[in-house]
Amino acid sequence: MANALLEGKYYKKAIVDTAPAAGGYSTSEVPESVVRGFDDKKLTFSVSTGVGDVTLKYLGAGETDTWQDEAGSPYTAGDAKQVNTTAHDRRWKATCEEGAYTSGDLIFGFEW
């Protein structure tokens, strides 16, 4: 299998099973607005299986190309966190960078 994206009504994830090239392999972007209208307004990020490091990234409102690494990165299998969605219009993605993949099906992404 090759690296792939998994997307549904309430999730966006990636599976990395092949070492990513330059630029890494990322989930699709998730805007914080996906949780508006839900009672608990929770956006959750997790890494469920595989061996490697995943970097959580955000792009601030009005910004177009300078993704910032989230302070707690990198994350590994078993890690999960609730993303703070109070900034409005911020976008998130998760990336397995070049050289960060080790083995297995590294599955990571977002649920809301």
Image (cartoon, helix red, strand yellow):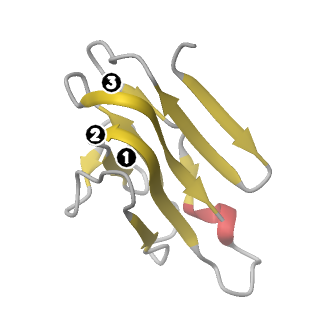
24 left or right of 84 in image: left
Mark number for residue 47? none
The percent position of residue 97, horizontal first and vertical second, equals 27, 29
Amino acid type for the residue under numbered disc 3: Gly
Q: Earlier in the sequence, mark 3 or mark 2?
A: 3
Q: Residue at x 26, y 42 (%)?
A: 53
Q: Is residue 93 visible?
A: yes
Type of the residue with mark 2: Thr
**SS class, disc 2:** loop
Quarter of the image for residue 94 reads top left
Secondary element under disc 3, as helix, strand or loop, is loop
Asked if the residues shown at circle 3 and circle 2 are in contact, with their CB atoms under 8 angstroms apart, the answer is no
The residue under the point 26% across, 58% down is 70
- The percent coordinates of residue 36 (x first, y second) are 69, 73
**Disc number at residue 66?**
2
**Residue closer to the observer: 7 or 52:** 52
User: Nearer the observer, disc 3 or disc 2?
Assistant: 3
Q: Position of residue 103 (x, y in %)?
A: 33, 28
- The quarter of the image holding the C terminus is bottom right
Farthest residue toward the right? Answer: 9
What amino acid does circle 1 point to?
A: Glu
Cα gap from disc 2 to disc 1, whole angstroms: 7 Å
SS category of the residue bearing label 1: loop
Residue denoted by label 3? 24
> Taking 30 as reference, is 107 above or below it?
above
* Residue at mark 1: 63
Q: Is residue 110 above or below residue 67?
A: below
Give the quarter of the figure containing the N terminus: top right
Tell me how far mark 1 sits from mark 3, CA to CA.
21 Å
